[in-house]
Image: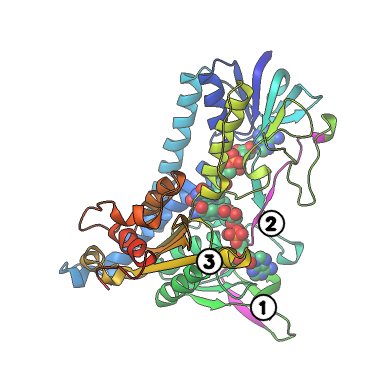
Amino acid sequence: MQYDVIVIGSGPGGYVGAIRSAQLGKKVAIVEKYDTLGGTCLNVGCIPSKALLDSSEHYHHAVTRFTEHGIETSDVKINMKQMISRKNDVVNQTCKGIEFLMKKNKIDVYIGQGSFMSQNIIAIESASGRKEIKGKQIIIATGSKPIVPDVFHYDKNRVITSTEALNIDEVPKKMVIVGGGVIGLELGSVFARLGTSVDVVEFMDSILPTMDSDCGKELMRSLKKLGMTFYLSHSVTGVTATKTGCTVNVQKRDSDKNFDIKADYCLVAIGRKAYTDGLNLEAAGITVDDKGRINVNEHLETTVSGIFAIGDVIKGAMLAHKAEEEGIFVAEYIAGEKPHIDYNLIPGVVYTWPEVAAVGKTEEELKASGIPYKSGKFPFKALGRARASMDTEGFVKVLADKNTDEVLGVHMVGPRVADVIMEAVALMEFRASAEDMSRISHPHPTYTEAVKEAALAATGNRALHI
Ligand code: FAD
Ligand code: NAD
């Protein structure tokens, strides 16, 4: 079979790239090695983690906040099996939705492991046999897998990654999480809210070390109140597991002091690596960098003309919306259009409570590059909307160029900031100034008023409610 475009991998990069190519009149095939479409994001990432974050948040509110709201409940119990079953339903519905979209856009779906035979022939191996298809252009969107060094003795039973953590169907008593990054804090929140004693071991001296440092500090205060314990500047040197538990050896950085923590589970969340196993990249002459990521140029074209790579398998943030933008970019580039991605404006969100959201430069990045800036900060506790919902933790921080007033970065910790951040992304796309941001009418009472107030503060101490 001959196609204009073959996409390998059906995650948010691959399936979106396939749809956009089909919209642009191409004959498209998508190859996926698992039985369900949607990749990491839909099956074992974004969607199931958010389903459990929502369920655990409802439970946590019921036991910690309802009384203050004047709602009397008795005997609130967790039915973990039902929680997991609802999560699975959400995943199934979402993945089925991708199947529908493939049919709607007349995209041929091949289930099986794809590998290069040459620069334009892809072999597909599955239980039902082997096929070969030919493509004028090929898009590699094979995603990433968790990093788990051998010393952790990953057994998928007691030493686990996010994939297994999303299916634990009883509330563990104790969990050690290696890595205070996005996965560690989101899944750590799920279990801490349900009553698990959660210890986070983070190698750096703050959680979320790549985000603006104010965000990590603020979030850590909230997560400590939730009962989570943090070992910053510590790393795990090894884990030993039995059938029913594990012992995690923890060492202080730059010291030989170490101690053991016994737990039901050790969740390893220290990052993910590009996944190219079985692709047989050599047959096409495609190269990877020192981290195993496929090398691409500014058009996301690999070292071989006509073969592109997108999403987690190349450099950059490992985010579903980044992969999607790249899928659209490549489809449009192949069709002769002139697409553009501003990587500086890809927002990052952590779905803890309070949530964390950011776009643009951090204060540390501005300092390091010597850009003169001014900063305005507004705390949620000064906002009527936040007091009404009892969600007063966090802040919005606006960073603007000292000379031109252009907004350079916006960083937030607080209620629903995962949604609120879009105002900053949109304004920065149009290169708005802090003054522009501060003069837009924001509905009252909403969490978005904190953005206006922070922008007012950035334009010279003009915040109205502090
Ligand atoms: P993937 O989604 O990884 O898809 C790659 C697909 O390729 C897979 O289905 C794989 O089976 C298939 N494949 C691989 N090799 C082959 C082959 N040889 N032949 C055929 N098929 C192959 N990001 C966010 O933006 N927001 C979030 O809230 C979020 N939450 C997350 C929570 C967790 C627990 C995890 C693990 C990740 C989360 N992410 C989140 C990250 C997000 O899931 C990834 O950035 C995103 O899925 C990357 O998309 P992709 O298309 O590049 O690859
Ligand atoms: P991460 O890079 O976000 O965090 C890993 C953390 O582990 C870092 O803070 C790092 O300093 C620490 N670390 C590394 N080695 C360590 C060691 N030996 N001991 C202790 N700490 C160590 O990675 P992640 O949390 O595994 O997530 C992987 C990817 O998935 C991320 O790139 C993220 O973008 C994506 N993701 C995104 C979302 C979201 O957008 N909400 C949610 C989950 C995952």
- How far is the residue under mark 1 from the one under mark 2? 18 Å
- Ligand 2 within 8 Å of disc 2? The answer is yes
Query: Where residue 11 appears, x then y in whole percent?
Result: 57, 37
User: How busy is the neighbourhood of tag 3: few (under 14 within 10 Å), some, or many (20 plus)?
Assistant: many
Magenta stretch: give its range: 259-281
Q: Residue 129 occupies which quadrant of the picture?
A: top right
The residue indicated by pointer 3 is 363
**According to the image, label 1 marks what residue?**
250
Tag 2 residue: 147
- Residue at the location (37% across, 50% down)? 423
- Looking at the rendered structure, the kind of residue marked 3 is Glu
Quadrant of the rendering where the N terminus is positioned: top right
Work out whether residue 98 or residue 209 is closer to the camera in this orientation and state it: 209
**Picture layout, residue 445 above or below residue 174:** above
In what element is the residue under mark 1? strand
**In the rendered image, is residue 149 in sight?**
yes
275 in magenta: yes
Residue kind at label 2, given as amino acid type: Ile
Residue 448 in the magenta stretch? The answer is no
Left or right, residue 403 beside residue 112 = left
In the picture shown, does residue 395 fall above or below 438? Answer: below
- Could you tell which of marks 3 and 1 lies nearer the N-terminus? 1
- Seen at 58% across and 37% down, the residue is 326
Q: Secondary structure at mark 3?
A: helix
Q: Amino acid at mark 1?
A: Val
Work out whether mark 1 precedes mark 2 in sequence or the reverse, and give the earlier one. Answer: 2
